[in-house]
DNA sequence: TTATAGAGTTAGACTTATTCTAAGTCTAAC
DNA sequence: GTTAGACTTAGAATAAGTCTAACTCTATAA
């Protein structure tokens, strides 16, 4: 799923098939949002997605942006990234990896998992199973 | 700084001296908040602190809770912990360490830094310096 | 001591990310 | 084609956190 089409182009046929394969009905709104998310690897706030999707002729409501982002997270198509205290980012790279977070600019950057070797995960609390291991490397100017 | 006094007891003399040593004027409100934060290691939301501090006779406003938590973070006396998408937690353990976050219960647990050996930090983005490296191990029931 | 400048506190208004509601629209199965 | 239920929507609601402007306290100087 790396299509690299422009928003102005017509919907790539693969995208609807992809959503269907994930048991997601490919509505016009979801296709617009999916196109933004799945044709580039980046970290988007809900507002970013809302602005991007409404830049072209398409109009998608705020509620649908949140609904769709929530659905895609549920289906494992994107991941939430919690690095900023005021908003969630959504990551279209669902492979395990880590992040730099620039405290000054608010910019997020991927760290490939082989760049930070976690020797071992500690014993999990009783009655729990692992969901994810994520490293945030916070950096500052200078 | 591990005093383990109860809120109902009178202010431990060491606490005011401690705040003064950190260039923080020890007002009544700050002492009440400090007592909650510094006499136990735990992870508190602003609301937790507000509720705790107002359980006893003391009354501290929401604004002062936020002001004081912000001041203490600035002075390095506590740390923000970002694991939950809807609120910030404050950690009175400022030594480098990591966290378990239970997605079902919302509970945070410390992981000692020697329990997760990060072999190396990757090359930082140009023009930046390291602020912190934090690992969140998310777990689920079962 | 007392006066005073400025630091700290406060109620409540405000902001803003996110969720909810309830009414309308679309999709897909029959 | 009908229809049930899935989807979308505007706008109201929620909730964490910030701001404002008036009041109170602290600490220093006289
Ligand atoms: Mn917040
Ligand atoms: Mn939020
Ligand atoms: Zn990423
Ligand atoms: Zn901790």
Image (cartoon, coloured by chain):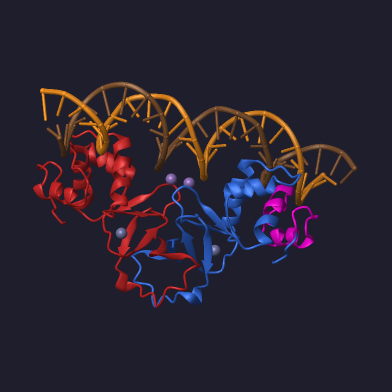
Chain colours: A red, B blue, C brown, D orange
Say whether residue B96 is visible: yes
Q: Choose between B99 and C2: the one closer to the eye.
A: B99
Examine the rendered structure and indicate whether residue A108 appears above or below residue D12: below
Q: Choose between A101 and B84: the one closer to the eye.
A: B84
- Locate residue A53: give its quadrant: top left
Q: Which residues are magenta?
A: B6-34
Count of labels shown?
Answer: 0
Residue A57 appears left or right of D8: left
Residue found 71% across the figure and 46% down from its top: B55
Residue A104 appears left or right of A68: right
Residue found 46% across the figure and 47% down from its top: B86
Q: Quadrant of the C terminus of chain B?
A: bottom left
Ligand 4 quarter of the rendering: bottom right
- Locate residue B10: give its quadrant: bottom right
Residue found 18% across the figure and 42% down from its top: A26
Task: Residue B142: say if magenta.
Answer: no
Task: Residue B17: say if magenta.
Answer: yes
Residue B24 position in % (x across, y down): 67, 55
Residue B105 position in % (x across, y down): 50, 55
Residue found 9% across the figure and 42% down from its top: A10
Q: Choose between A85 and A34: the one closer to the eye.
A: A34
Residue D29 appears left or right of A131: right
Residue C3 position in % (x across, y down): 81, 37
Q: Quadrant of the N terminus of chain B?
A: bottom right
Residue A93 position in % (x across, y down): 26, 58
Examine the rendered structure and indicate whether residue C6 appears above or below residue A139: above
């Amino acid at each position: 799923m790396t299509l690299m089409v422009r928003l102005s182009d017509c919907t790539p046929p693969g995208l609807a098939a992809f959503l269907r394969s994930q048991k997601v009905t490919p509505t016009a709104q979801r296709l617009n949002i999916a196109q933004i998310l799945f044709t580039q690897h980046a970290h988007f706030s809900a507002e970013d997605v809302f602005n991007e999707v409404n830049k072209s002729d398409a109009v998608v409501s705020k509620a649908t942006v949140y609904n769709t982002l929530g659905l895609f997270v549920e289906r494992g198509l994107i991941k939430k990234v919690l690095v900023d205290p005021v908003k969630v980012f959504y990551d279209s790279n669902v492979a395990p990896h880590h992040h730099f977070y620039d405290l000054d600019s608010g910019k997020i950057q991927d760290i490939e998992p082989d760049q930070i070797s976690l020797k071992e995960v500690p014993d999990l609390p009783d009655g729990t199973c692992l969901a994810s291991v994520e490293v945030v490397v916070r950096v500052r100017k200078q």
